[in-house]
Amino acid sequence: MTPDHSARPEGRSSPAAPGLDRRSFLGAGACGAAVPLLGAASAAAQPAVAAAPDVRRPLDVKLRINGQDHRLALDSRTTLLDVLREEVGLTGTKKGCDQGQCGACTVLLDGTRVLSCLTLAVMAEGRAVTTIEGLARPDGSLHPMQQAFVDHDAFQCGYCTPGQILSAVACVQEGHAKDDAQIREYMSGNLCRCAAYPNIVAAINQAKSEMGA
Amino acid sequence: MSIAAPEPKANMGRPEPRLDARLKVTGEARYPSDVPVGNPLHAVLVTSAIAKGRLDRLDTEAARAVPGVVEIFTAENTRELKPLEYTPGGGGASTSVQGLGPDIAHDGQIIAMVVAESFEVAREAAYKVKATYAREAPSASFGAAGLDEKPAGKEFPKAGDAAAALSAADVVVDAEYGTPTQHHNPIELFTTTCVWDGEHLTVHEPSQFVYGLKNSVAKRLGIDPAKVRVVSTYIGGAFGSKAQLTPRTPLVALAAKRLGRPVKLVASRDQGFTIATYRAETKHRIRLGARRDGKITAYTHDGREVTSRPDAYKVAGVSDTVRLYDFGTVATSVNVVHADRNTPGFMRSPPVVPYVYALESAMDELAVALGMDPVELRRINDVTKDTVSGKSWSSRSLMKCYDEAAAAFGWSRRTAEPGSMRDGEWLVGWGCATACYPTHMAATTARVRLLPSGEVRVQVAAHDIGTGAYTVIGQTAAERLGVPLAAVTVELGDSDLPPGPVAGGSTTTASTCSAVIKACDAIREKLVRAASTANDGPLAGRSPSDLSFTDGRAVASDGAAESVADVMQRLGTAALEEYAEYIPHGVQQDGIRKLYSGRAAMTGGPHGDKIMYALGAEFVEVRVHARTREVRVPRAVGAFAGGRILNPRTAHSQLMGGMIWGIGSALHEATEIDPREARYVNDNISEYLIPVNADVPRIDVIMVPEEDAEVNPAGVKGLGELGNVGTAAAIANAVYHATGKRIRDLPIRIEDLL
Ligand code: FES
Ligand code: FES
C-alpha cells in the first residue's frame, strides 16, 4: 500500500520514508478508529494492512454536533473536518491546510479545542462537537467572543476566524488568557495571513471578562 | 473608539464595523468551496515529480480500479482545451504551461486529475497514478547553469548622466541586495467548484477578478463568455494569488461537463505552491552618489528577477523607486532570468516590495556613510518635481509621515552608533524606511438602486478580499444618498453584476467608490429635479444646488424638506436605479468595453499628468540577543498618508496587517528551493514561516490626514498594498543599528548574525 511517489498527488516532495506521512496513512488506509494515530506509521508499512477490512465500506457513525445527533455512513478515513463540511453541511469550519498547521479547522470536542483535520470522524463518536455555527445563542445573539471579534475588527478576510474564535473560547476557558503575552502564545496555533493578531488579542481581552474568566 | 477603530481625523469617514462582520464571526459567510452544490464529485490533482523533461507514460490502471473512481483526466483526454496566451496580470492566463504534459516545464505541474465519488477515494486513487519521465537537469535559480537572462524591456527610467555624477560624488554607496522566493499562502486553499446547467457554467472559485476569470475560462473551453458565471462572494485571502486564470479551473469545468455532475476541487496546501503564482526571487545592485551635505546626485539600480522558462514575468519596480527622492541623475535596468520554475506573479505590493527594500536599505547605508540621521537624509532629498519626467506630485506627505512617526516612536532618543543602545542581554536597534505605493485607478461600473423606503442596493462585481470593500462601498452610497448605512445592501463578487476592477494594486476603493458616487449623483439629480421643479410641495421652486440629502430626506439650506418617498411618489416611480461607468483620466474610452471582456484597464502612479503615490514612514525597534542572536521586533510605528480614508477601522486593519507582512518578509518568509531538482522543499505552512500571534509586537498605525482632489472623485489613494512596503528595510536597517552587521539578503535569520 505504499504510495507511488513517481507522481505527487499532493505534491509531497521525497518523504524520508515513503508512505510514512499522514497523508498517505489517510490515503492508503488503515483499519479506522482501531488504529491510534501514533501507531499508524508502522501499521501502514506492514503488509498485514493488506488484509485489513475494506476502508471504503461505509461505517455507521453517530455524531453529536452542536447538540444535534447525526447518523452517518462514512468511509473510515473521513476526517471530522470533511464530515462537517461535506456531509453535514456545516461549512463554517474551514480547511486551510488539512495537515494540522493552520488552525482554521479548530472545533471543540467536549469543550477542548482540537484540529478537525487531524481527527478522524469516528474518533468523535460519543463526544460533543461544537462548531462556529453552535456558538451563538439560540435567539441569534452572539457569544461574547464573537461580539468582541466584531468590535475589535479581529479579522479581514475572515477565513481563519471560525477557528480563531473557537480557539479563543477554549484559550479563555483553559485559563490561558491571563495577559497579552500568554494569549499570544496560546493563540499561536491559529494562523492569520491577514495578520489581525493584535486585534485578536484585544478581542480576547474584552471577551474574557464577559465570559467570567 | 478603540485601537482597532481609531477616531477619524480630517478627511476621514466613520470607523463603521464591517457590513459582513456578523457573517464572518458566525461561519455563515460562504466562501466558494462552502457553497452547497447537488451531489458533487470530488477531484484530486496529481502533479509532476520532475521540473524539466517529458512525461513518457502515465499508468492510471491501478487508480481506475479503485471503487468509486469515475474518471481520470490526463493530457490524452483534455486536448480540446484551447491554449491561452499568457498575460501578466489582469485576468488572463497566469502561465503558458497549461497542458497536462507530455512536456514538463516545472516541478509540481498538473499532470492528471482524478475524479471520484468522494474526496477519500479520489485521494487514494491519485496516489496510485504512476508516472514515468524522461528527466532533464533543471536550472533552479540565480547561479545555476542553463539559465537564460534577458533585458525585461527596451527602456527603463533614466535621467541625466548618472555615471558622471557618480564619479564626481563626495560619497558613494555601492551594494547588492537580494529578496527570496515567497508564496502568498492565503489561509483559504485554491478551490474550484464547477456546475453546469445545460450550456451554462457556474464557477465557484475565490477570485480577485471574476470578469477576468469568466472570460478566460470561456476562451479556454471555447464557449461564449455569456454562458459562464463566476461567483466569489467571500475570498479567504488572496494577496495577488487569485487574480488570474490558473490551469486548474478549465480542467474542473471540463470534468463537470463531461461527467454531467458538479465537480469540486480543493487543492492541497503543497500543490498551491506550484499550481498558482508566487513572488519571484530578485537581486539588485544599487549605487547612490551624494554630496557631503547629503544631497543625492546619482541613483543607479540594476534589478534581476527570476521567472519561468516560457513567460517573461517581471515587476521592474525601478519605475516607482525613481520617483521617491530628488536624485539628480538616474540610470536603471531590469533583467529577467528564465529558470525551470512555475511562472511567478503579483504578490502583495508588486512591484515595489523588492525594489523599495533595496533602495531603502541603500539610503540607510548612505546615511551611515555621511554620518547623517536617516530621517534628515530623506528630508534633504524630498522631491517636488520628478527627476525623470519633470512632473509634479498630486500630493506628497512623506515628511509629515516621517515627523509624526518619529515623534510617536521617540526617534530623537536614538544614539547613532551601532550597538550603542544595548539593554542587558539585548542589542537594541532602531531603523526606519519609506513606504510607497502607486495610486492606481481602474475603469469600473456600478449599479445603484434606491427604494422609497430609503433602502439602497449597490451592485458591482468588485471583490472584498478582506479589505473592507463591502463596507466602504456601502458607506459611500449611504453618505451620498443620505440614508443610514444599515439601509444599504452591497452585492459584490459575482460576474452577473456590472463589472468591477481587479482587486489588486489597491484600486478597488478609489475606482469602485468613484463609480458609486457617479451612480448616486445621477439618482440625486433625478430627485432634486423632481422636488424642485414641482408645482407644489415643500421644495417647489428651489435651486437644485440648494438641496442636500440626509436622513432619507431632501433638505434645503433653510430647513425645508421633503422625504425621498414623497419625491419618488411625485416622480411616479417605485425605484430609482442608475448604472454608471467610471473611466479614470488616462484610461482610453474603450476601457469599459475591455472590462466587460475581462481585461483590466488601469492608470495612475507615474503614468498620469501628475505623479500619484500613497506614502508612509515606518519605524521599528529590533532586539538581537547578544549570545543567541535571536531577533525580535517588540514594536513598530507606521505613519501613512493615502488621501481620503473612508473607514479608519478597516484602513487601520489593512495597514497593520501590511506591517506584519513586512515583519514576515524581513525575518521569516522564504520558499527554499532544492537546486538539483528545482523543487520547493518547504511547501507547507509549518516550514514556510509566516508570522504567528506570538511574533507580533505592538504595532502603532498613524493615519496622516491628506487631501488630494486630483487623484479621483473619491479622493482615495488606496492602502492595501502600502503597509508592508517599508517594513523589511526598516528592520534590516534596525538590525544594522543593533549589531553593526549589514544584512542585504532577506530574510534575516539567526545564522546571518552569528
Ligand atoms: S486545516 Fe486543520 S490545521 Fe489547517
Ligand atoms: S482574517 Fe484572513 S486569514 Fe485571518
Image (spheres, grey):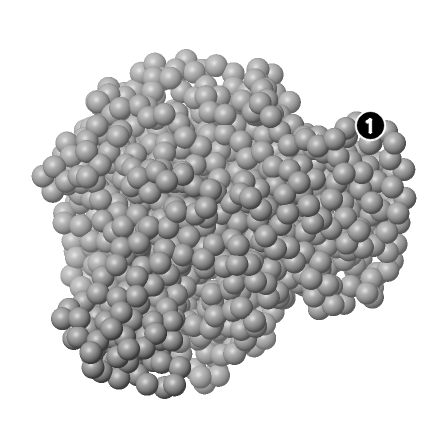
Ligand 2 lies under 8 Å from the Cβ of mark 1? no
Answer with the quarter of the image where residue B475 lies. bottom left
The residue identified by callout 1 is B164
Answer with the quarter of the image where residue A163 lies. bottom left
Residue closer to the observer: B486 or A125: B486
Please give the name of the residue rendered at 56% of the width and 24% of the height, measured from the top-left corner.
Answer: B153
Q: Secondary structure at mark 1?
A: helix
Please give the name of the residue rendered at 65% of the width and 58% of the height, measured from the top-left corner.
Answer: B397
Please give left or right for residue B243 compared with residue B506 in the image.
Answer: left
Name, please, the residue furthest toward the left.
B198
Please give left or right for residue B683 compared with residue B67 in the image.
Answer: right
Q: Is residue B213 visible?
A: no
Residue A149 percent location from the top left of the image: 43, 71
Residue closer to the observer: B229 or A84: B229
Please give left or right for residue B540 compared with residue B273 in the image.
Answer: left
Residue type marked 1:
Ala
Please give the name of the residue rendered at 82% of the width and 27% of the height, measured from the top-left corner.
Answer: B164
* Subunit of label 1: B
Q: Is residue B616 visible?
A: yes
Q: Is residue B431 above or below residue A112?
A: above
